[in-house]
Amino acid sequence: MNYLKRFLAGLMILMVFLTVGCGDNISDYENNIPVSVYSDAFTLYNNKQDSLQLCVFNGVLYCWTGISVYRERGLYYLNGKNLTRIELNDFSDNWVFWGFSRGYAYFLYYPDGVKTSSDMQIYSYSLEHKTMEFLLSYSSEDQHVSRKLFFAADGTLYCPEVGCENYYYPILDGKIGEPISVQNEYQLGDRGYRTVYGFPTRIQYTEHNQDDFIELPGARDRLLLPTNDGIIVYNKGYEHLLYLIHPDGDVGELFYAPCYKSVSAINVYEDYAFFSVKRYDVVTILGFDTRTNYSNDTISGSYRIDLKTGALQKCSEDTYCSLYIFGDNNLVGVTEQDEIVFMDFDYQIIDTLKP
């Protein structure tokens, strides 16, 4: 009997030990995703990504999913190891997500469903209070009004006042202010740089009240990214992917990848750009052009670029179609399969959230 009691006591101690051990392992596994320590400060570059749109607010990761074969269209938050959909509304195709800023998500709504229409409304959604609020409506003849919306570096969303050139309604923290005079451009030295709709190879600038432009060969879909070391011109989707406009006005090419098409992403932190690119070649099958992978591709991958020197460091063979930065050493990538990959600045993977 004493032997039996000793055996049962030892068995109970062993079970407690195993239970505690398993609990620690599960806890460690759930805590691999380091969102709780991510910075939720607004960064301009996080709102210039494709595919999934991510932000962090009060230690919670939020995600907007548009057209996707992996997830239902809508707004999500990270709940443990899963993305949980916020039951806000049906988010039909009439709704266009415009960006996150300081605890708010902004949407454009087209009542007639035509996204080139002049009939458009702007809404904000509070991530904290879970409420949607109407802000502004347009019903003018200006059918390009949505192209004139832009975020400033402090997170303000500027919406044009129709009929008043360079006057915008400022929207910050979900509230709209009176129109003010604002230039949608980035200042570098004595020049203010901006893209010009309809002229894909040009970057226009104003210096001493005189307008001029820079011609960039191969530019198609330009995006300007201001940095400590100049202005990056990001030409996503093509060969001449990255240029850097220096403070003295000189322009250098940062990244060239000969290809038929490319899928890429960029983000900036201090003096470094984090850049990922996947190149595609083209083959013609039955008269149709089809993209295909390059064999022995040594260019596709993920890089860290020193903007002071222009030096490229290839850190990983993996590629991403979006890159987010949430503070020092906190990098998040989104793959073409809608996987969310948590990494450090060396592209070392910490955890992966699969759809």
Image (cartoon, helix red, strand yellow):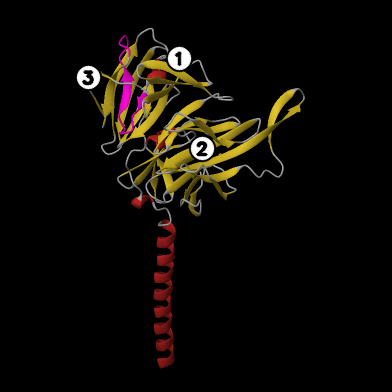
The residue segment tinted magenta is: 150-165
Q: Which mark is residue 265?
A: 2
Q: Amino acid at mark 3?
A: Glu
Q: Tell me which numbered mark, 2 or 3, is placed earlier along the sequence.
A: 3
Tell me what residue is drawn at x 47 percent, y 17 percent. Answer: 197
Q: Tell me which numbered mark, 1 or 3, is placed earlier along the sequence.
A: 1
Q: Is residue 1 visible?
A: no
In the image as oriented, which residue stretches furthest toward the right? 286
Q: Is residue 229 visible?
A: yes
Q: Is residue 219 left or right of residue 183?
A: right
* Magenta stretch: dominant secondary structure: loop
Q: Which mark is residue 26?
A: none
- Identify residue for label 3: 178
Depth check: 230 or 71 in front? 230
Q: Is residue 237 left or right of residue 129?
A: right
> Residue 58, position in %: x, y?
30, 45
Q: Is residue 20 left or right of residue 283?
A: left
Where, by quadrant of the figure, is residue 227 drawn? top left
Label 1 or label 2, whichever lies nearer to me, is 2
- Identify residue for label 1: 116
**Residue 268 magenta-highlighted:** no
Callout 1 environment at 10 Å: few (<14), some (14 to 19), or many (20+)? few
In the image as oriented, which residue stretches furthest toward the top? 141
Q: Secondary structure at mark 2?
A: strand
Distance from the alpha carbon under mark 1 to that under mark 3: 26 Å
Q: Amino acid at mark 1?
A: Thr
Depth check: 109 or 156 in front? 156
Distance from the alpha carbon under mark 1 to that under mark 2: 26 Å
> Residue 212, position in %: x, y?
44, 17
> Residue 184, position in %: x, y?
36, 22
